[in-house]
Amino acid sequence: MDTRELYRRFAAREARGNSADYERLAGRIADDAELVSRIDHLPEPKRQPNLLLAAVRFLDGPTDDPQDFRTWTLAHWDRVRATMMQRRTQTNEPARCATLLPLLAALPQPIALIEVGASAGLCLYPDRYQYRYDDRPPLGPADSPVSLACQTAGPVPFPERLPTVAWRAGIDLNPLDVRDEEDVHWLECLIWPEQTHRLNRLRNAVRVAQAEPAHLVRGDLNQSVRELVSRVPQGATPVVFHSAVLAYLPAEAREAFTRTMRSLPGHWISNEAPYVLPSVEGKIPRPTPQDRAVFALALDEQPVAFTGPHGQSVEWFN
């Protein structure tokens, strides 16, 4: 996909209805030959709209007016480029736990969680958050600083209790430290401008993680996941999971990861764009929506639902 189409698609399918600023900016960038030329000189994985927009915000650049954004970004391109090369789109959305919870709670307990592409590990605490599915009574600790609302459709197997987490660990090429102010600031810049509810949720989830830091290792998922699974405490069910991670890997690396997961004990929960895992995509029982971005949630390569990318919704299959 060329850069113009990448930014137009982001504006229409991801930003629309979620961030008016980003929808407007991405559309203008797509029509700006000079900005597109600058972006095209970056390695392909570094051309992502989220990465560019977060980098500008990280450097205190403007994102509320397209002309101001253009002027500032071109004038500070060397700094913007350096930030984009150094950083990654490590959006760490704890609300995705709401879409994972029905699967996590149904597995043999206790569970040992291993997240690949963990960022700062904020999705490793499903037992520390409270959940509100539609108008159902809240589930989870009443004193949790994080309350996750999720709209549902279909026969969702709502859990009666939270999972018991015996151990939690994560893998990332560049793990972020919730005790490091600059890392936390980068996470905040990945939240879209108008979404103050997501920003507040992130900050509260950081507090949870700071009180009980997870074991995060730096490494490639294909090289590290087997070793982490081998460290799962006896009596716990290993659960490897990920959200919006595998799309950043080349096809051969995804295939290698799939082969690895098939050979490991425990369970594998994937929450990715439908096209990312062909073994999942081919089993989805209904057409993928074309008017909005969705993930396909799957347990051991069996798709069970479409989910909102930020954990805002789950549509369970029959």
Image: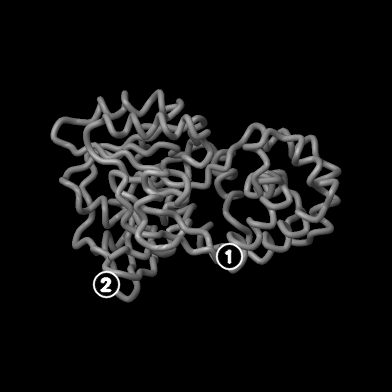
Secondary structure category for the residue under label 1:
loop
Q: Nearer the viewer, residue 276 or 97?
A: 276
Q: Quadrant of residue 77?
A: top right
Residue 115 spot, x, y in % from top left: 37, 39
Inter-mark Cα distance, 1 to 2: 27 Å
Residue 144 position within the rendered picture, expressed as x and y whole percent measured from the top left: 33, 58
Toward which corner of the image does residue 233 lie, by quadrant?
top left
Q: Position of residue 215 (x, y in %)?
A: 36, 32
Closer to the camera: disc 1 or disc 2?
1
Q: Which mark is residue 8?
A: none
What residue sits 71% from the left and 56% below the top? 26
> Which residue extends farthest bottom?
135
Query: In this image, 305 relative to 63: left or right?
Result: left
Kind of residue sitting beneath label 1: Asn
Q: Residue at 35% across / 70% down in the picture?
A: 153
Above/below status of 82 relative to 152: above
Of helix, strand and loop, which one carries label 2?
Answer: loop
Task: Report which residue position mark 1 lands on.
Answer: 18
Give the crowd class for mark 2: few <14, some 14-19, many >=20 residues within 10 Å.
few
Q: Tell me the residue at 25%/26% (across/down).
A: 231
Residue 149 point in image, percent of width and height: 39, 66
Q: Which residue is mark 2?
A: 137
| Left or right, residue 172 beside residue 12 | left
Would residue 255 appear left or right of 34 to someone viewing this image? left
> Which of these two is toward me, 169 or 299?
299
Residue at the far front in the pictured view = 282
Query: Looking at the rendering, in which quadrant would you find the C terminus?
Result: bottom left
| Amino acid at dot 2 | Pro
The image shows residue 144, relative to residue 149, as above or below, that is above
